[in-house]
Image (cartoon, helix red, strand yellow):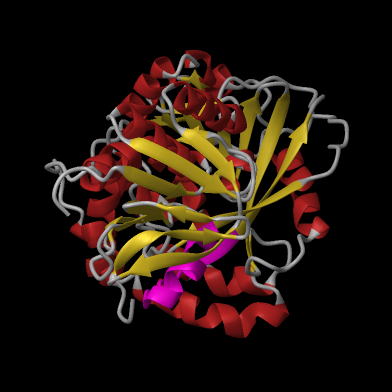
């Protein structure tokens, strides 16, 4: 396609879709966003842990982690859980996940994630200023906790990967931990502090602020459930919704965990799986935090949010249609008590469950669909959707607009998957 498309359709009003739509609109395009839910309400953008983790370049599939997976799968209270009825559905994805832990695959994934995320903090800081919401980002770092040296040793490979890619890590003893967060319980004696990291105090308000800025710039947000992508003469022509046909010269598929369903009829069999996460928002937690606290053994983020303390985590396989499991959410109370035994929080008013769109190699799909001109992908960010949203907008917008690129998109191509 020569030149910029006249009409661009972005499918998905989560943080990735809205950040990209805003950047495209600011670049002079005429953009419409369509989603079944209002901006930020349909997927993981509403309820994520709020971390901006620019140094998270080590993929989830690491040899050290894989040794822990069998035990976790058999323990209902473990951070990773596959319900018995979902084993056969999850098996192909898990097999790809195991293959992604090979050294060469880890090296490729790390390079791709670093290429996407290394400027994430600066890009988010610039974006929140641009949309008039600088108070959303809190540059107070992130604190990871370990019970002892043996537990820290299990994560050493991931930390060394981060360090090799420029992360500034400060190893803390018990006294240094308490100097940052005095309420942390005695079980945790060692820490890793990422002083140059940040968090978002309200991921939902971030998406809303992006949507408001997008509309002020002339963009349009339409509420409709997309049922299929439309093509004409071999190229994209728009998308069919339950309410209307949305015509466009370029379409960006940024529908999070639902993206693979829409891409499949066009021949793209992308191994996208929902890693369902839960959170509790505690309005009266009995303690005050300055930054996200991440106990490595519990695999949760405990984050100070606007008006609440959020405990977010767990990985549950179960697909897009299975009902949430309240017992998984209940585990988060124990996670909080393990780190902050003096906390006496009031019970949360219910819980939240959302779908993280995860790929086996932890690298999102970003870029043009090579077999369908005019179609672009922006999904699969896994646990890093918030972090990767602003970088994805900067990376992909020039490609959608037909402008020269500053970075090769090949590492993020959907076609990297066999059979995709």
Looking at the image, residue 253 sits to the left or right of residue 161; the answer is: right
> Measured from the top left, where is residue 312 in percent x and y?
65, 43
Residue 162, placed above or below residue 346: below
- In this orientation, does residue 118 appear? yes
- What range of the chain is rendered magenta? 257-275
Quick one: quadrant of the N terminus? bottom left
Q: 347 or 264, which lies in front?
A: 264
The residue located at (37%, 57%) in the rendering is: 59
- Magenta-colored stretch includes residue 82: no
Q: Nearer the viewer, residue 152 or 252?
A: 252
Q: Nearer the viewer, residue 190 or 9?
A: 9
Relative to 73, is 406 above or below?
A: above
Q: Position of residue 404 (x, y in %)?
A: 11, 42
Residue 267 is a magenta residue:
yes
Q: Is residue 173 visible?
A: no
| Drawn side of residue 195 relative to residue 48, left or right | left
Q: Determine the residue positioned at 54% across, 70% down.
A: 69
Where 135 falls versus 47 (above or below)? above
On the image, the x and y values in percent for residue 57 come to 33, 48
141 sits to left or right of 366: right
Quadrant housing residue 238: bottom left
Q: Residue at x 57, y 75 (%)?
A: 70
Q: In the image shown, does 38 or 49 lie closer to the viewer?
A: 38
Residue beneath the point at 85% across and 29% down? 344
Left or right: 93, with 280 as reference point? left
- Image quadrant holding the C terminus, namely bottom left
């Amino acid at each position: 396609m020569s030149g910029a498309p006249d009409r661009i359709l972005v499918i998905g009003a989560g943080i990735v879709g809205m950040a990209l739509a805003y950047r495209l609109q600011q670049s002079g395009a005429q953009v419409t966003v369509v989603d079944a839910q209002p901006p930020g309400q349909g997927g993981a953008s509403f309820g994520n842990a709020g971390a901006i983790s620019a140094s998270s370049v080590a993929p989830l599939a690491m040899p050290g982690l894989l040794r822990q997976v069998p035990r976790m799968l058999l323990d209902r209270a473990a951070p990773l859980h596959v319900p018995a009825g979902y084993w056969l559905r999850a098996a192909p994805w898990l097999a790809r996940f195991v293959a992604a832990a090979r050294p060469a695959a880890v090296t490729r994934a790390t390079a791709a994630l670093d290429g996407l995320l290394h400027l994430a903090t600066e890009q988010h800081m610039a974006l929140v200023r641009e949309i008039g919401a600088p108070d959303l980002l809190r540059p107070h770092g992130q604190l990871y906790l370990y019970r002892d040296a043996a537990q820290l040793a299990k994560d050493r490979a991931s930390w060394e990967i981060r360090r090799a890619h420029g992360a500034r890590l400060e190893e803390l003893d018990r006294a240094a931990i308490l100097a940052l967060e005095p309420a942390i319980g005695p079980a945790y004696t060692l820490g890793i502090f990422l002083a140059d990291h940040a968090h978002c105090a309200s991921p939902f308000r971030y998406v809303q602020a992006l949507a408001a800025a997008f509309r002020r710039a002339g963009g349009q947000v339409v509420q409709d459930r997309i049922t299929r992508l439309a093509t004409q003469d071999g190229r994209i022509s728009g998308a069919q919704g339950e309410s209307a046909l949305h015509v466009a010269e370029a379409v960006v598929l940024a529908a999070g965990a639902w993206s693979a369903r829409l891409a499949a009829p066009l021949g793209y069999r992308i191994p996208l799986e929902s890693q369902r996460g839960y959170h509790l928002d505690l309005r009266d937690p009995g303690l005050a935090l300055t930054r996200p606290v991440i106990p490595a053994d519990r695999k949760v983020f405990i984050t100070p949010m606007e008006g609440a303390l959020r405990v977010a985590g767990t990985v549950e396989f179960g697909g897009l249609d299975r009902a949430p499991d309240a017992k998984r959410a209940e585990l988060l109370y124990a996670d909080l008590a393990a780190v902050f035994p003096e906390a006496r929080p009031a019970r949360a008013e219910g819980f939240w469950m959302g779908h993280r769109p995860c790929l086996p190699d932890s690298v999102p799909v970003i870029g043009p669909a090579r077999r369908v001109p005019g179609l672009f992908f922006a999904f699969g960010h896994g646990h890093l959707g918030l972090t990767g949203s602003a970088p994805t907008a900067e990376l992909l917008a020039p490609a959608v607009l037909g402008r020269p690129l500053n970075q090769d998109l090949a590492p993020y191509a959907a076609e990297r998957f066999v059979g995709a």
